[in-house]
Image (cartoon, grey):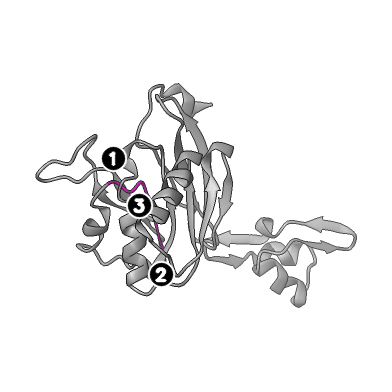
Amino acid sequence: MNLLFLGTSAGVPTKTRNVSGVALRESKGKGWYLIDCGEGTQHQVLHTKLSFHSLKAILITHVHGDHCYGLPGILASAAMGGRTAPLTLVAPKGIQTWLEATCAVTQLCLPFALEFICADDLPSIEFENIAVETCALSHRVPCYAYTFTERNVEAALDVDKLDRHGISRGPLWGQLKRGVDITFEGKPLRSQDYLLFKHAPSYCQILCMAGQAAVLSD
Protein backbone atom coordinates (compact mmCIF):
# COMPACT_ATOMS: atom_id res chain seq x y z
CA MET A 1 0.00 0.00 0.00
CA ASN A 2 1.06 3.59 -0.46
CA LEU A 3 -0.47 6.98 0.27
CA LEU A 4 -1.03 9.96 -2.00
CA PHE A 5 -1.92 13.20 -0.24
CA LEU A 6 -4.49 15.14 -2.25
CA GLY A 7 -5.03 17.77 0.42
CA THR A 8 -3.50 18.52 3.82
CA SER A 9 -4.86 21.96 4.72
CA ALA A 10 -7.28 22.33 7.65
CA GLY A 11 -10.44 24.42 7.52
CA VAL A 12 -9.74 26.24 4.27
CA PRO A 13 -7.38 25.65 1.34
CA THR A 14 -4.18 27.62 0.87
CA LYS A 15 -2.55 28.69 -2.39
CA THR A 16 -0.48 25.52 -2.36
CA ARG A 17 -2.56 22.99 -0.42
CA ASN A 18 -6.10 21.71 -0.81
CA VAL A 19 -8.31 20.69 2.11
CA SER A 20 -8.40 17.11 3.40
CA GLY A 21 -8.13 14.18 1.04
CA VAL A 22 -5.89 11.11 1.09
CA ALA A 23 -5.72 8.35 -1.52
CA LEU A 24 -4.58 4.92 -0.36
CA ARG A 25 -3.45 2.75 -3.26
CA GLU A 26 -3.34 -1.04 -3.20
CA SER A 27 0.04 -2.72 -3.58
CA LYS A 28 -1.05 -4.46 -6.77
CA GLY A 29 -3.32 -3.24 -9.52
CA LYS A 30 -5.04 0.13 -9.77
CA GLY A 31 -7.47 -0.12 -6.85
CA TRP A 32 -7.57 2.81 -4.44
CA TYR A 33 -9.52 4.22 -1.49
CA LEU A 34 -10.31 7.86 -0.76
CA ILE A 35 -10.20 8.99 2.85
CA ASP A 36 -11.99 12.32 3.21
CA CYS A 37 -13.11 14.44 0.30
CA GLY A 38 -12.75 18.14 0.91
CA GLU A 39 -13.90 20.67 -1.68
CA GLY A 40 -11.80 20.45 -4.84
CA THR A 41 -10.68 16.86 -4.34
CA GLN A 42 -11.95 15.88 -7.78
CA HIS A 43 -9.64 18.49 -9.30
CA GLN A 44 -6.70 17.17 -7.28
CA VAL A 45 -7.35 13.69 -8.64
CA LEU A 46 -6.92 15.05 -12.18
CA HIS A 47 -3.26 15.70 -11.37
CA THR A 48 -2.68 12.01 -10.60
CA LYS A 49 -2.94 8.70 -12.44
CA LEU A 50 -5.91 7.66 -10.29
CA SER A 51 -9.06 6.54 -12.10
CA PHE A 52 -12.58 6.87 -10.74
CA HIS A 53 -13.28 3.47 -12.30
CA SER A 54 -10.73 1.91 -9.91
CA LEU A 55 -12.03 3.67 -6.78
CA LYS A 56 -13.09 0.97 -4.30
CA ALA A 57 -14.51 3.10 -1.49
CA ILE A 58 -14.77 6.58 -0.01
CA LEU A 59 -14.37 6.87 3.75
CA ILE A 60 -15.26 10.11 5.55
CA THR A 61 -13.81 10.78 9.00
CA HIS A 62 -16.39 13.35 10.14
CA VAL A 63 -19.03 15.80 8.94
CA HIS A 64 -17.08 19.08 8.92
CA GLY A 65 -17.07 20.65 5.48
CA ASP A 66 -13.33 20.63 4.84
CA HIS A 67 -13.55 16.83 4.98
CA CYS A 68 -16.69 16.22 2.91
CA TYR A 69 -17.79 19.17 0.73
CA GLY A 70 -16.12 17.63 -2.32
CA LEU A 71 -18.21 14.46 -2.14
CA PRO A 72 -21.07 15.45 -4.51
CA GLY A 73 -18.57 16.71 -7.07
CA ILE A 74 -16.42 13.60 -7.06
CA LEU A 75 -19.49 11.38 -7.41
CA ALA A 76 -20.69 13.51 -10.32
CA SER A 77 -17.28 13.26 -11.98
CA ALA A 78 -17.29 9.48 -11.57
CA ALA A 79 -20.77 9.34 -13.11
CA MET A 80 -19.88 11.58 -16.05
CA GLY A 81 -16.75 9.51 -16.58
CA GLY A 82 -18.88 6.44 -17.20
CA ARG A 83 -18.58 4.59 -13.93
CA THR A 84 -21.30 1.96 -13.42
CA ALA A 85 -19.79 -0.30 -10.73
CA PRO A 86 -21.21 0.06 -7.20
CA LEU A 87 -19.23 2.30 -4.85
CA THR A 88 -18.96 1.91 -1.07
CA LEU A 89 -19.29 5.02 1.10
CA VAL A 90 -18.32 4.73 4.77
CA ALA A 91 -19.28 7.82 6.76
CA PRO A 92 -21.16 9.17 9.77
CA LYS A 93 -24.96 9.04 9.45
CA GLY A 94 -25.19 12.79 8.87
CA ILE A 95 -23.26 12.46 5.61
CA GLN A 96 -25.92 10.18 4.16
CA THR A 97 -28.70 12.62 5.09
CA TRP A 98 -26.82 15.60 3.61
CA LEU A 99 -25.79 13.75 0.45
CA GLU A 100 -29.31 12.48 -0.26
CA ALA A 101 -30.67 16.03 0.11
CA THR A 102 -27.94 17.42 -2.16
CA CYS A 103 -28.61 14.82 -4.85
CA ALA A 104 -32.35 15.52 -4.68
CA VAL A 105 -32.04 19.31 -4.88
CA THR A 106 -29.39 19.31 -7.62
CA GLN A 107 -30.96 16.37 -9.50
CA LEU A 108 -27.73 14.39 -9.33
CA CYS A 109 -28.68 10.92 -10.60
CA LEU A 110 -25.85 8.42 -10.29
CA PRO A 111 -25.61 5.54 -12.80
CA PHE A 112 -24.07 3.36 -10.09
CA ALA A 113 -25.24 2.13 -6.70
CA LEU A 114 -23.87 3.99 -3.68
CA GLU A 115 -23.59 1.47 -0.86
CA PHE A 116 -23.64 3.41 2.42
CA ILE A 117 -22.07 1.94 5.58
CA CYS A 118 -22.59 3.94 8.77
CA ALA A 119 -19.28 4.66 10.51
CA ASP A 120 -21.17 5.27 13.76
CA ASP A 121 -21.53 1.48 14.06
CA LEU A 122 -17.71 1.09 14.00
CA PRO A 123 -17.87 -1.41 11.14
CA SER A 124 -15.23 -3.89 10.04
CA ILE A 125 -15.27 -4.11 6.24
CA GLU A 126 -13.50 -6.53 3.94
CA PHE A 127 -12.72 -5.67 0.35
CA GLU A 128 -10.95 -8.04 -2.01
CA ASN A 129 -7.44 -6.90 -1.08
CA ILE A 130 -7.95 -4.66 1.95
CA ALA A 131 -9.60 -5.04 5.36
CA VAL A 132 -10.80 -1.87 7.10
CA GLU A 133 -11.41 -1.33 10.82
CA THR A 134 -13.14 1.75 12.25
CA CYS A 135 -12.07 3.46 15.47
CA ALA A 136 -13.86 6.30 17.28
CA LEU A 137 -11.91 9.50 17.98
CA SER A 138 -12.50 12.46 20.28
CA HIS A 139 -13.78 15.56 18.44
CA ARG A 140 -16.67 18.05 18.62
CA VAL A 141 -18.67 15.82 16.29
CA PRO A 142 -18.61 12.04 15.76
CA CYS A 143 -15.20 11.34 14.25
CA TYR A 144 -13.44 8.17 13.14
CA ALA A 145 -10.06 6.78 12.15
CA TYR A 146 -9.73 3.99 9.61
CA THR A 147 -7.19 1.20 9.79
CA PHE A 148 -6.28 -0.54 6.53
CA THR A 149 -4.67 -3.98 6.53
CA GLU A 150 -3.53 -5.76 3.39
CA ARG A 151 -5.24 -9.05 2.59
CA ASN A 152 -4.26 -11.91 0.27
CA VAL A 153 -0.52 -11.42 0.61
CA GLU A 154 1.21 -13.71 -1.88
CA ALA A 155 2.29 -16.93 -0.18
CA ALA A 156 3.78 -20.34 -0.94
CA LEU A 157 3.05 -23.66 0.73
CA ASP A 158 5.42 -24.75 3.50
CA VAL A 159 6.20 -28.06 1.80
CA ASP A 160 8.64 -29.21 4.49
CA LYS A 161 6.02 -28.74 7.21
CA LEU A 162 3.39 -30.56 5.14
CA ASP A 163 5.77 -33.49 4.69
CA ARG A 164 6.61 -33.56 8.41
CA HIS A 165 2.91 -33.74 9.24
CA GLY A 166 2.32 -36.51 6.72
CA ILE A 167 0.05 -34.50 4.44
CA SER A 168 0.67 -35.90 0.99
CA ARG A 169 0.60 -33.81 -2.16
CA GLY A 170 -2.94 -33.66 -3.50
CA PRO A 171 -6.23 -31.75 -3.28
CA LEU A 172 -5.62 -30.78 0.36
CA TRP A 173 -2.52 -28.86 -0.69
CA GLY A 174 -4.60 -26.88 -3.15
CA GLN A 175 -7.16 -25.99 -0.49
CA LEU A 176 -4.49 -24.83 1.94
CA LYS A 177 -2.83 -22.75 -0.80
CA ARG A 178 -6.17 -21.03 -1.49
CA GLY A 179 -6.53 -20.14 2.19
CA VAL A 180 -9.11 -22.81 3.01
CA ASP A 181 -8.90 -24.49 6.42
CA ILE A 182 -9.10 -28.29 6.23
CA THR A 183 -9.61 -31.39 8.35
CA PHE A 184 -6.88 -34.06 8.17
CA GLU A 185 -7.23 -37.37 9.98
CA GLY A 186 -9.94 -35.87 12.15
CA LYS A 187 -7.92 -32.79 13.13
CA PRO A 188 -8.76 -29.25 11.97
CA LEU A 189 -5.82 -27.49 10.31
CA ARG A 190 -5.54 -23.77 9.61
CA SER A 191 -4.37 -22.72 6.19
CA GLN A 192 -2.25 -19.86 7.54
CA ASP A 193 -0.16 -22.35 9.54
CA TYR A 194 1.04 -23.97 6.32
CA LEU A 195 1.78 -20.87 4.27
CA LEU A 196 5.01 -18.92 3.91
CA PHE A 197 4.10 -15.29 3.24
CA LYS A 198 6.48 -13.19 1.16
CA HIS A 199 6.06 -10.30 3.59
CA ALA A 200 3.91 -9.29 6.53
CA PRO A 201 0.60 -7.63 5.58
CA SER A 202 0.97 -3.87 5.13
CA TYR A 203 -0.85 -1.80 7.74
CA CYS A 204 -1.91 1.83 7.78
CA GLN A 205 -4.07 3.90 10.14
CA ILE A 206 -5.48 7.19 8.87
CA LEU A 207 -7.02 9.89 11.04
CA CYS A 208 -7.65 13.51 10.18
CA MET A 209 -8.68 14.89 13.57
CA ALA A 210 -8.15 13.71 17.14
CA GLY A 211 -8.62 15.45 20.45
CA GLN A 212 -7.30 12.64 22.64
CA ALA A 213 -4.49 10.44 21.36
CA ALA A 214 -5.29 7.93 24.09
CA VAL A 215 -8.44 6.92 22.24
CA LEU A 216 -6.31 5.25 19.57
CA SER A 217 -4.45 3.08 22.04
CA ASP A 218 -7.59 1.43 23.45
Apparent side of residue 117 relative to residue 69 in the rendered image (left or right): right
Note whether 111 is above or below 62 in the view shown: below
The quadrant in which the C terminus is found is: top right
Tag 2: amino acid:
Gly
Residue under pointer 2: 29
Badge 2 density bin: few <14, some 14–19, many ≥20, Cα 10 Å: few
Residue under pointer 1: 66
Image quadrant assignment for residue 111 = bottom left
Apparent side of residue 174 relative to residue 217 in the rendered image (left or right): right
Q: Mark 3 falls on what kind of element?
A: helix
On whether residue 29 falls in the magenta region, the answer is no
Residue placed furthest toward the front: 105
Indicate which label's residue lies in the foreground, 2 or 3.
3
On whether residue 36 falls in the magenta region, the answer is yes
Residue at image coords 38%, 23%: 211
Residue at image coords 76%, 76%: 171
Q: Mark 1 falls on what kind of element?
A: helix
Where does the image place residue 173, in percent across and percent down from the top left?
72, 72
- Contact flag, marks 2 and 3 (Cβ < 8 Å): no
Q: Mark 2 falls on what kind of element?
A: loop
- Contact flag, marks 1 and 3 (Cβ < 8 Å): no
Badge 1 density bin: few <14, some 14–19, many ≥20, Cα 10 Å: many
Mark 2 or mark 3, which has the lower sequence index? 2
Any part of residue 30 in sight: no
Any part of residue 177 in sight: yes
Where does the image place residue 156, in percent across and percent down from the top left?
58, 67
Q: Nearer the viewer, residue 98 or 177?
A: 98
Residue under pointer 3: 71
